[in-house]
Image (spheres, grey):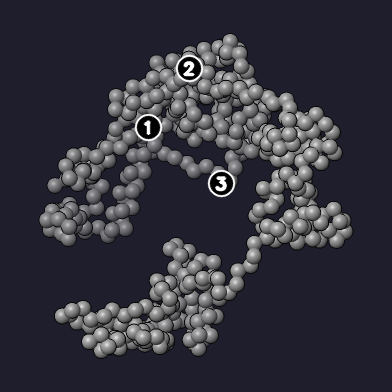
């Protein structure tokens, strides 16, 4: 009989006597027969023993303070400069050779756990900083010779790390205590080194990508960046022939239209640049800024139209905005074009309840509108309609019969009244799910005509 390996070596952790008995799933299910001690007492003693062992082995953990970590009290001006040089959450080494973490506009104290990983964490931070320096040089300089010192530094740091600790992506296999259901072999999981918590650094994945790792052989080879350029510097664009090209360049570099930039690209002044842009951009009275046409003429165009109409009352120059927005405002749907099905997430539950009260003539109606899955349910206040009871809704179409209102209101009821099942050849007639269990479905009135 296979049991958890930990319990096999620590029988005192079993709160009773282990037994193998026939059970629901196997002829040798593992059960525990309690001893004479009350279960709360036995559980408390066992947990106290585990905690004591953890303390003696140094395997304790203390929760950090709630909220943002306290700023480093000994932080110097040089330490605070690390905030602008690293993203939020980055682990850094301070002037006093201690560790800190970028938290907002401050550097907060960072405790390495376990403490024995401090040297490895320091090596990983140096590797990360060398990588960032090399990538920045490649992105800004086309001179490969200028990148050579940073590339050499990255190679030295990586080689030193691998010689001391092994591959960056290394792992060990640890037994899970479970077996494969088909083969019966032990199942393992990958356990990766803690690295002093470096996996929580924003650049963790970038550093891991420095090597091409084979999980089968656990061998790593250097990535291309160690010996060749991987980032091509962007060539600055000094000019544009048309206003459309100038706008595209400006959007690519700045993310929004900027008249000064566009005018510089076109070699003209801002007023002339605005005239050349024409309807490629629009002045937004709501944002108070220049907006590209695809953005201005999309989205909540009704709200934009209302703002433009209000602005046009005081200044006629906004009439062009009004005309352009009116041309793109979609036509309102008519009532017959709206498919309002029960269970649709865009219909408020109060509207469904009001509909049910009006149609069914019943005041005691509640509507459930769960978030996931998005299914609405209409029922009586005390719950769903009982079998054979509840409010009835009668359909007079051929082949349709009475159904419970709670059943009719289910989202999967199609058009409200589903076609009942007909008698199968040689079988029993179907049952109406809205009636009692013993109620048989009345025959289809069309059956006689077919005979």
Compared to residue 346, the image places residue 425 above or below, namely: below
| Residue identifier under label 1 | 192
Residue 296: x and y in percent read 70, 50
Residue 31: x and y in percent read 19, 55
Secondary element at image label 2: helix
**Between discs 2 and 3, the one toward the N terminus:** 3
Q: Which mark is residue 449?
A: none
Q: Which mark is residue 66?
A: 3
Nearest the camera: 399 or 111?
A: 399
Residue at 63% in and 67% down: 332
Compared to residue 74, the image places residue 379 above or below, namely: below
Q: Which mark is residue 226?
A: 2
Q: Is residue 250 visible?
A: no
**Gap in angstroms between the C-alphas marked 2 and 3:** 41 Å
**Between discs 2 and 1, the one toward the N terminus:** 1
On screen, residue 358 versus residue 281, left or right, reads: left
């Amino acid at each position: 009989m296979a049991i958890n390996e930990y319990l096999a070596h620590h029988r005192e952790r079993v709160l009773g006597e282990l037994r193998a008995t026939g059970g629901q799933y196997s002829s040798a299910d593992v059960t525990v027969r309690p001893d004479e001690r009350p279960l709360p007492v036995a559980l408390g003693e066992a947990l106290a023993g585990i905690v004591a062992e953890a303390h003696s082995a140094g395997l304790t953990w203390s929760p950090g303070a709630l909220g943002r970590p306290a700023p480093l009290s000994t932080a110097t001006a040089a330490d605070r400069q690390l905030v602008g040089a690293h993203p939020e959450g980055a682990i850094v080494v301070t002037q006093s050779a201690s560790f800190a973490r970028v938290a907002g506009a401050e550097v907060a104290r960072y405790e390495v756990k376990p403490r024995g990983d401090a040297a490895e964490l320091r090596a990983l931070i140096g590797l990360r900083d060398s990588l960032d320096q090399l990538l920045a040089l490649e992105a800004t300089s086309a001179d490969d010779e200028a990148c050579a010192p940073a590339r050499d530094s990255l190679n030295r740091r990586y080689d030193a790390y691998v010689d001391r600790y092994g591959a960056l992506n290394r792992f060990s296999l640890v037994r899970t205590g479970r077996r494969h259901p088909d083969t019966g072999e032990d199942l393992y999981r990958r356990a990766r080194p803690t690295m002093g918590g470096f996996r929580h650094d924003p650049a963790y994945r970038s550093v891991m990508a420095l090597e091409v790792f084979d999980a089968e052989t656990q061998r790593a080879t250097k990535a291309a960046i160690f010996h060749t350029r991987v980032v091509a510097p962007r060539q600055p664009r000094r000019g544009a022939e048309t206003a459309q090209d100038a706008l595209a360049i400006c959007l690519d570099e700045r993310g929004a239209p900027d008249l000064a930039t566009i005018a510089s690209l076109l070699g003209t002044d801002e007023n002339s640049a605005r005239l050349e842009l024409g309807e490629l951009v629009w002045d937004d009275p709501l944002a108070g800024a220049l907006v590209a046409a695809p953005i201005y003429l999309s989205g909540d165009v009704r709200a934009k139209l209302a703002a433009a109409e209000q602005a046009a009352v005081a200044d006629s120059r906004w009439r062009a905005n009004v005309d352009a927005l009116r041309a793109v405002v979609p036509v309102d749907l008519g009532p017959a074009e709206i498919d309002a099905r029960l269970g649709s997430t865009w219909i408020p539950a109060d509207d469904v309840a009001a509909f049910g009260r009006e149609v069914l003539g019943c005041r005691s109606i509640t509507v459930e509108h769960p978030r996931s899955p998005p299914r609405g349910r209409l029922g009586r206040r005390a719950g769903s309609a009982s079998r054979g009871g509840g409010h009835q809704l009668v359909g007079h179409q051929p082949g349709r019969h009475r159904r419970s209102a709670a059943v009719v209101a289910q989202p999967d009821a199609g058009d409200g009244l589903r076609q009942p099942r007909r008698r199968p050849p040689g079988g029993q007639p179907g049952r109406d799910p809205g009636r009692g269990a013993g109620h048989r479905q009345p025959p289809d009135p069309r059956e006689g005509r077919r005979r």
